[in-house]
Image (cartoon, grey):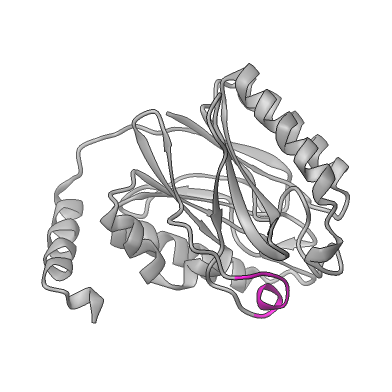
Amino acid sequence: MRIGAYQFSITSDVDSNFNKIENAINEAKEKQIKLLVFPECALTGYPPRDLKSSADVDFTKLDVIYNQLQQSCNLLDINVIIGTITQEDNKYYNAALFFSPFRERQSYKKRALWGWDKDNFEIGNDEGIFQVDDWKIGIRICFEIRFPEYFRELYKEQTDINIIMFYDVSDNNDVFRYEMIKSHIMTRAVENVTYTLSVNAISPFQTAPTILFGRSGQVLNETVRNEESLLVYDLEKKEIDFGETGRKEVTDWLLSNSMLNR
């Protein structure tokens, strides 16, 4: 399966964000990408960095855009995962929406909330598992990378690839944070023996990478930091190697003996 991850500078202007997203979808179709992923809050911007609060989102406009995104997926035969803000019963969620050709829209709502997230969102309760053909895809959002428990959930569900959507940026050129979060992503890939893809916003300074790790932590592709670009990679379902088999066997034993549930 050919996958893509598009990093760009997200703003408070929903129309501008959507224009970038539509252009990226068209580019992805030209490159025969089957699944295209965008950052956290890519459509709406992230409060309070881009807008004062979640209540300032024009949800009527978003409904129109969602319909347009669905039509694009139907027409181009492409699957898209996009970060946005959703509203349900006067509650706001930091959400990932999954658009698939001629299928009902699905969502994952962020659960690990802290700081600005707690000020603007409610805790979600979705599993965060989507399906594209025979690929089982796990979704997590930003701060959740810090907690291996969220990824053990996906391990138990035997996902083929896990995706982390970030809006992790800084006003300063914080290279240390970039490398630290990169190491978190690598660790989640290695300990769960699962392809792991991340995608992030890029400005003012990108502090988490847009990168794809293999099941043993090898970098399969990475975009240039702070530059708008599209990551592309052809994923294959290969047999796990000797080291990966060992990690899975020990993990399965620990889980079966409840060692990881205490």
Q: Residue at x 30, y 56 (%)?
A: 155
The quadrant of the rendering that contains the C terminus is bottom left
Q: Residue at x 80, y 50 (%)?
A: 59
Looking at the image, residue 82 sits to the left or right of residue 226; the answer is left
The magenta span reads 115-122
Is residue 236 positioned above or below 212 on the image?
Answer: above
Indicate the quadrant where residue 18 lies. top right
- Image location (x, y in percent) of residue 75: 64, 17
Q: Residue at x 65, y 62 (%)?
A: 93
Q: Magenta stretch: dominant SS? A: helix
**Viewer can see residue 27:** no
Q: Residue at x 29, y 34 (%)?
A: 237
**Viewer can see residue 161:** yes
- Image location (x, y in percent) of residue 135: 36, 35
Indicate the quadrant where residue 22 lies. top right
- Image location (x, y in percent) of residue 205: 75, 62
